[in-house]
Image (cartoon, rainbow, N blue to C red):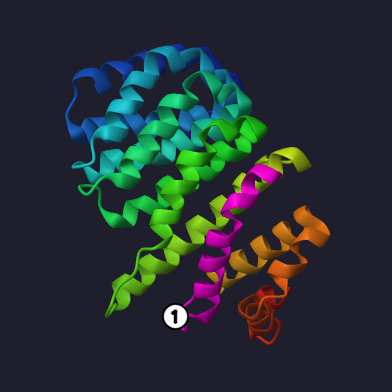
């Protein structure tokens, strides 16, 4: 499918999708992985045309998202959900409630491997960009969950723990950025204001942590800039905080030119 031109794929799309749907209904976990990867290629190639299959496919996608004990299946389903959101944009509205609820359930799940959770958070960020101001219906529940995820920490972290924390924090910062960008007008962005303090706390932790990777630092500084620009003079007190100024100073004298920018 990846190698087929869209013009040719269109002629066989129904055949492919019907086959994938049948496999997902009755196949094994390995077969489910392959079917989900096949649907992923169809979505990436056909963009919003894939919406014609969503009524039949959504229950199977949600079932795969629920399959937290099959890490590969669940992980591929999370990526596919994100691809669908990116492909169809605001047309995702009919199934947005179900997807957001499943994303939140995944973040709460004690059975889901921790390394998968940053991917879920990224998927929520994609949903925020796709829905724009309409994402505000989920804002309270989503921000509450993200705040809980931001509290994740280890007393004596090893290398794997440090890598996970960087992935988690980067996903949180990028998703906060997406949510804020989606709330594009002044009235909508005001809905973000009650959460700024907790977002600022995460940014301060990132700035102080000696194990913070460059990509996470870049995401933190970028979010500070977006919020400062969005709130204008109202953000002066936030940006002037000592911890934020230290973060900005740290970024300016960083050896990585991308961080300095």
Say which quadrant the C terminus sits in.
Answer: bottom right
Q: Position of residue 244 (x, y in %)?
A: 64, 75
Q: Are there few (<14), some (14-19), or many (20+) residues within 10 Å of tag 1?
A: few
Place residue 253 in its image quadrant: bottom right
Near-viewer residue (191 or 164): 191
Q: Is residue 244 magenta?
A: no
In the image, the segment drawn in magenta is 190-212
Q: Residue beneath label 1, please? A: 211
Near-viewer residue (207 or 8): 207
Q: Is residue 208 magenta?
A: yes
Residue in the picture at 70% in, 78% down: 260
Q: Position of residue 220 (x, y in %)?
A: 60, 66
Residue in the picture at 47% in, 16% down: 13
Q: Is residue 209 left or right of residue 112?
A: right
Q: Position of residue 177 (x, y in %)?
A: 62, 53
Look at the numbered disc 1 and give the secondary structure of its residue.
loop
Dominant secondary structure (helix, strand or loop) of the stretch shown in magenta: helix
Place residue 58 in its image quadrant: top left
Q: Residue lying at the far right in this picture: please name it.
A: 233
Residue in the picture at 65% in, 69% down: 221
Residue 1 seen in render = no
Residue 221 lies, with reference to residue 54, above or below; the image says below
Q: Position of residue 255 (x, y in %)?
A: 64, 86
Residue 140 seen in render = yes
- Numbered disc total: 1
């Amino acid at each position: 499918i990846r190698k087929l031109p869209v013009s040719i794929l269109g002629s066989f799309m129904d055949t492919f999708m019907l086959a994938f749907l049948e496999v997902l209904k009755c196949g094994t976990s390995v077969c489910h992985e392959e079917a989900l990867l096949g649907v992923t290629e169809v979505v990436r190639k056909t963009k919003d045309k894939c919406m014609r299959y969503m009524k039949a496919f959504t229950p199977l996608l949600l079932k795969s998202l629920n399959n937290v004990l099959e890490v590969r299946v669940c992980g591929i389903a999370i990526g596919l959900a994100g691809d669908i959101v990116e492909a169809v944009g605001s047309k995702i509205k009919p199934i947005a409630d179900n997807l957001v609820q499943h994303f939140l359930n995944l973040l709460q799940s004690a059975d889901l491997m921790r390394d998968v959770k940053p991917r879920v958070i990224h998927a929520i960020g994609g949903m925020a960009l796709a829905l724009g101001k309409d994402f505000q219906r989920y804002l309270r529940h989503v921000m509450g969950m993200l705040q809980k995820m931001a509290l994740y920490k280890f007393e004596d972290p090893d290398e794997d723990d440090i890598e996970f924390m960087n992935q988690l924090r980067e996903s949180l910062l990028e998703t906060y950025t997406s949510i804020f960008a989606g709330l594009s007008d002044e009235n909508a962005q005001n809905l973000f204001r009650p959460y700024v303090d907790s977002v600022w706390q995460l940014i301060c932790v990132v700035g102080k942590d000696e194990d913070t990777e460059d990509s996470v630092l870049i995401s933190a500084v970028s979010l500070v800039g977006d919020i400062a620009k969005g709130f204008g003079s109202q953000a002066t007190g936030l940006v002037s905080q000592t911890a934020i100024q230290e973060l900005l100073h740290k970024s300016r004298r960083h050896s990585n030119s991308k961080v300095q920018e």
